[in-house]
Amino acid sequence: MKKIYLMAIAVLFAVGLTSCEDFLERENYTEANTSNYPASPSDLNKELAALYGVMNQMSTAPLETPWFVNYIMSDDANGAGGTGDVESHAVGHLMSNKEDLYYDAWKNTYVGIARASAIISAVDAFDWTGQETARNQMLGEAYFMRGLLYLWGVQFFGDIPAYWAPAAPDPCPQLSAENEIMPHILADFVSAANLMSHGATTRGDGHATKGAAEGMLARAYMFYEGFYKKAGELATASLPDVPFDFEQEAAGSSLSKSQVVAFLEDAINNGGYKLVEDFRLLWQYTNELTAKDGKDEKGNDVAGYAFVKDLADAGKFWAGNGNEEEMFQVQYMNSGSWNGTIGMGFVNQVELYCALRCDDDGAGTANGDLNTFPFGQGWGQGTINATLWDEWSDNDPRKRATILDAQAECEKFVFTTSCSEDAGYYNKKWMTVTCPQSSWSDHNTAYTWWGAYRVQNTSAPNTNGNSMQGDHFSDIVLLRLADVMLMHSELTGDATQMNKVRARAGLPATTYSWKNIKDERRWELAGEGLRFNDLRRWSGKDGGSSCEAAVALQKQEGSRVNYCGTWTKMSHGKGVGGSSWAQRYADTDGFLPKPNSQIALINDASILSQNKGWYDGTAWSLSGTPVY
């Protein structure tokens, strides 16, 4: 297990923003600028660290991150939280409670793009003789991150301002995501994959790898062909090559489906990754402190987590951050603080947001102590929607490895007086986890298992002074091998890789069908923030209110939830604007609103315009808490 303070790159030295970035974001984040920096190859390493640091900047606002927002917008999850958590409710209902709801997401996307483009443009200002591999790796990582940031930007906002030169033009108009931006995204990932070498970086060190580039290329390609080109079932579709009508190092002139498949096969066979032997070992609740018996702060014996007792008895524990299945991730470390603009970006706040709802049931019983061991308390957002639980077979062991049925599994779970959209199902993959050594009486010291580990293995205090809020350091896994293997089966119609994933879960082999691969992705990757864009690409752009995504989202209507201690049913119409999930999806195509402040700043619709379904005549506004 890695030391806590070695879990992320903390250098946040930024490069200058020029011209177009002034309208994309008015703040200047830097002191150095492109006229005096970088001055040496070592400066480029600082810029690369700053580029990865953008993901920590994003993490300061979990409800504006691609991973958490896409999770809550899907049919996997409810916005939930407390009755006053209007923002999470708005995200879950595909609505908005304010005009700049995703301002930080917009800002950080362009900060990252500027940093990536600066590295790409500056690499060959230096002599790399004898260091060509290092040069190509650095350039490949910059291409990877630029492709990823543009992909996130396009999936969030659709047609956006885009450029690929060292500096942006002024003005910098939004471009067609389908016709102009997506081909560049694909080219960036191809360049990254071709420039980088397997083994050039250490697995889990926070850097992009060749295998990660190959996997993300497939994700982008499948979204492009499915959503924008409406290709339907990719295994049987006749897909023309994607032309690259521009020159870019190592990208080639076009991209074919067969090339994408070859990249996936290279990642699977040569990337150095493999499936963790037991699905449960991917998630932090199998860590050694939690899985094994121990003593609480008063010296009383506390049994380890019963659900993983078989693993503990066999001496098998959490595979850890940067494990052999992880291919790319957001990393965190013990540097979280409520002071400054990025401090809490070094904490995996999603764990806090997805933890059991705090407060009590009105009779003094609260969640999060021994009565709900090993799951701690937090904000109770992103609860699992009951339809996911109901539609998932009990014969699939991944169901209970992914979803906490809190009423059945916890000694005493309560629905609090402030809870909303809470069916009692929580996402185990992203929850706060405690251990017998947790400080139940003082949540500020060593409340989480990470806090207990920190106290036992380091002399470092919790930097934000509150273990419940700050001791969260598990990676957000953005890509893992199982996902890559399932993409291979979906593109080829060959069930071999899918069946390897099923075999790891102890499930029998099956045949390929579009339904089977869709189901497999839903179960294997549930709660990891991928479902929403899977639904979008299976539906195609302009799918309307009867497409697969709209129908899946609409199933949330009438699902059982608890509201302030009383059971009721989820409803999009009552107290939420009179619309429906299906209609909101049809109105927006799953795109988010661009910040109105940026549109007003430009005041020219030919340069920057708002997406359909937002701040117009549609039912976009959620100004208060849904009342069921």
Image (tube, grey):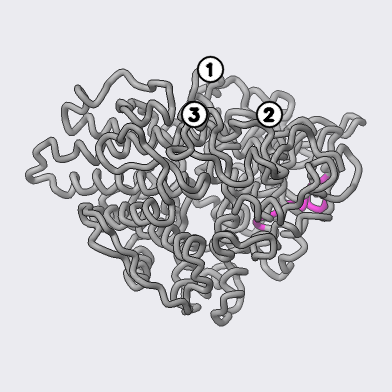
Residue 334: mark? 3
What span is in magenta?
Answer: 401-411
Residue 40 falls within the magenta-colored stretch: no
Percent x, y of residue 200? 25, 51
Disc 2 marks a residue whose amino acid type is Ser
Q: Is residue 27 something that shows in the picture?
A: yes
Q: Secondary structure at mark 2?
A: loop
Residue in the foreground of this view, choosing between 169 and 28 = 169
Q: Which residue is mark 1?
A: 339
Where disc 1 sits, the SS reads loop
Q: Does 152 sit left or right of 34 as displayed?
A: right
Q: CA distance from mark 2 to mark 3?
A: 18 Å
Inspect the image, locate mark 1, and give the three-letter code of the amino acid beneath it. Asn
Amino acid type, label 3: Asn
> Does the magenta portion include 405?
yes
- The residue where tag 2 is placed is 439
Which numbered marker is on residue 298? none
**Residue 92 position by quadrant:** top right
Q: Is the Cβ of the residue at disc 2 closer than 8 Å to that at disc 3?
A: no
| Disc 2 residue crowd, few under 14, some 14–19, many 20+, Cα 10 Å | many
Task: Name the residue located 58 percent from the left edge and 80 percent from the top edge.
Answer: 510
Tell me which residue sits at (43%, 51%) in the image.
177
